[in-house]
Image (tube, helix red, strand yellow):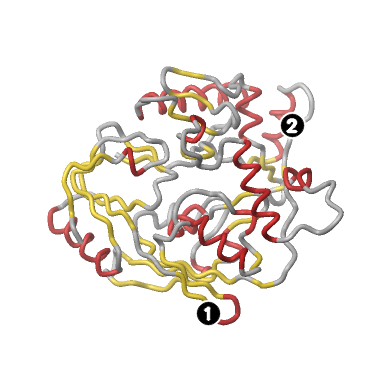
Amino acid sequence: MQLSEHVTLAPYTTFGIGGPARWFGEAATESDILAGVAFAQERGLPLFVMGGGSNLLVSDAGFPGLVLRIGLKGIERHEEGIFAVAAGEDWDCFVSETVAGEYAGLECLAGIPGSVGGTPVQNVGAYGQEVSQTIVGVRALDLHSGAFVDLPASTCGFAYRRSIFNGAERGRYIVSRVMYKLRRYLEPLISYSDLKRYFQDWASLPTLTDVAVAVREIRRSKGMLLVDGDPDCASAGSFFKNPVVPDAVLARVAAHSQGPVPRYDAGPGLNKIPAAWLLEHAGFSKGYARARAGISSRHTLALINRGGASAAEVLALRDEIVDRVQSRYGIRLEPEPVFVG
């Protein structure tokens, strides 16, 4: 594995923001991952593991250690609908392959940028599906033992946008492969309101391919599909998680609002409130701008690089939003992207 010095990270991210990495390398094999870890440890360097760069905001100062980009490739299809997928595979390409083979379970996750290795970390989800519903195992390097381990899904601590990989064991594991179990010839999932509206006039049942196409079209209409030259695409996707709050907090929000508050059941006594609704009712509309950072003209939750934005400008906009929503509703929004450096 070749390592390079002082590599600017902005081109490796969908935000297009970020200073240089002191060292940068791309791992094509598990041996490369081991070599990169050893290089960083021997020199006392901090290590950051990068996937597709679609969920990152990199500091303007860059990263003072080694950025190891995971580029492992390969998709193996086993019996009983098991797919073993290398962490560096493009996620949307993998979804397309499963849909084309009439395997159900990922059709609503079409169009999401990034690589396969990032999906278990955040328990990626959209339009009624989460990867935790199909993941059966994750292979990863355990930095505590220095050995690769195969973790069953039951040990990964999956929850809404969470797992042990970004929670209790953050920084311990480097994902090299993910195993999914999909079922063939099932009807597609159409539970999300946007999809129901899309297909409401269809006389026949949509196919898995129809649903994947619809999801991509809906994402594109919201500026959430990567399209070259689209100014709304210079982002990290949804910047804030939908907060999960108890009944008492929901009642407080309702008391300060005109009209009903949208909510989704999140378990006994818990409610998920759309973060986009909170932003809009706190005065942050689509197209809102602050210096060279702003909010997408098509999706309230997407903070964008309007052209030449710095990480500091994005963070200033983040803080403005978080502070105002908390002041108005007593809810502190939690960002989705990973902040590097």
The x and y percentages for residue 108 are 64, 54
On the image, numbered disc 1 is attached to which residue? 78
The answer to which quarter of the image holds residue 90 is bottom left
Residue occupying image coordinates x 65% and y 72%: 183
Residue type at numbered disc 1: His
Residue occupying image coordinates x 57% and y 55%: 159
- Screen quadrant of the N terminus: bottom left
Whether residue 328 sits left or right of residue 12 in the image: it is: right
The x and y percentages for residue 193 are 75, 44
Whether residue 290 sits left or right of residue 208 in the image: it is: left
The x and y percentages for residue 17 are 35, 34
Question: How many residues crowd around disc 2 within 10 Å: few (fewer than 14), some, or many (20 or more)?
Answer: some
The x and y percentages for residue 62 are 26, 37
Residue type at numbered disc 2: Val
| Callout 2: SS | loop
On the image, numbered disc 2 is attached to which residue? 261
Question: How many residues crowd around disc 1 within 10 Å: few (fewer than 14), some, or many (20 or more)?
Answer: few
Front-most of residues 255 and 278 = 278
